[in-house]
Image: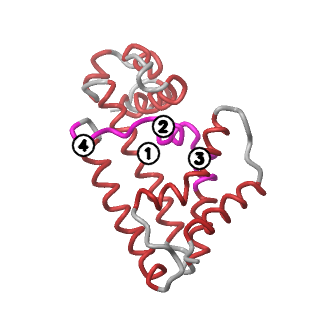
Amino acid sequence: MRTGKNGRDGRSRIIEGALRRFSQDGVSATTLASLREESGVSVGSFYHHFASKEHVFGVLYAETLQMYQDAFLAELTRHEEARGGIEAIVALHMSWCGEHPERARLLISERPPRREEPGGPEVADARRAFFRQVSDWWKPHMNARLLQPVPPTMCYVLWLGPAQEMCRLWFAGAHQPTEEEIKSLCEAAWNSLKQA
């Protein structure tokens, strides 16, 4: 059922409002009242869709993570060459964060929901499937001695750690990355992950 505010349903309005509030204030500083005010829904409408602020966060985080992972895998699987894939993902990360700054802030700044929390099972399942698909792309390049055999956490840190830090500076208003800097981040990722 669609209601006021441009015909969007209550659930969509709550999610959109939560994205704005969480991005601006952080999850811990956002109150249930501010979520309701931002989305323009009644108490009854809120509880019809979500059990708590944490429930909204869990759903929003899981949706955002899935969006990011879908874009990541679509880009990665377009590349058969190791260097092309590694560098393309850094560029994709930077462009995705620029196109979705509120969602990117959520992924960069907030702790993911734990398995027992709302959204936690979905996040855990999505991560498992995601790492399996990244590994399927990685292994042939590793076996060909093009990419290092690194565990998933180290792979993430070496691949996207510097890009994440650049995004933190960007979102804090401290520095706008240039095309040349993004190119340097791409090259740095390749140099960190290639086999010597």
Marks 4/1 in contact by CB < 8 Å: the verdict is: no
Q: Looking at the rendering, in which quadrant would you find the N terminus?
A: top left
Which element is circle 3 on?
helix
Image spot of residue 164 (x, y percent): 57, 47
Which residue is painted at 29% across and 40% down in the image?
Answer: 119
Query: Tag 2: Cα neighbours inside 10 Å, few (<14), some, or many (≥20)?
Result: many
Residue ranking furthest to the front: 196
**Quadrant of residue 115 in the image?**
top left
Q: Hey, what amino acid is under mark 2?
A: Leu
Dot 4 or dot 2, earlier in sequence: 2
Image spot of residue 11 (x, y percent): 36, 32
Q: Return the residue at label 1.
A: 64
Which element is circle 2 on?
helix
Image spot of residue 76 (x, y percent): 51, 69
Marks 1/2 in contact by CB < 8 Å: the verdict is: yes
Q: Return the residue at label 3.
A: 97
Q: Return the residue at label 2.
A: 106
Which element is circle 4 on?
loop
Distance in Å between CA atoms under marks 3 and 1: 11 Å
Q: Looking at the rendering, in which quadrant would you find the C terminus?
A: bottom right
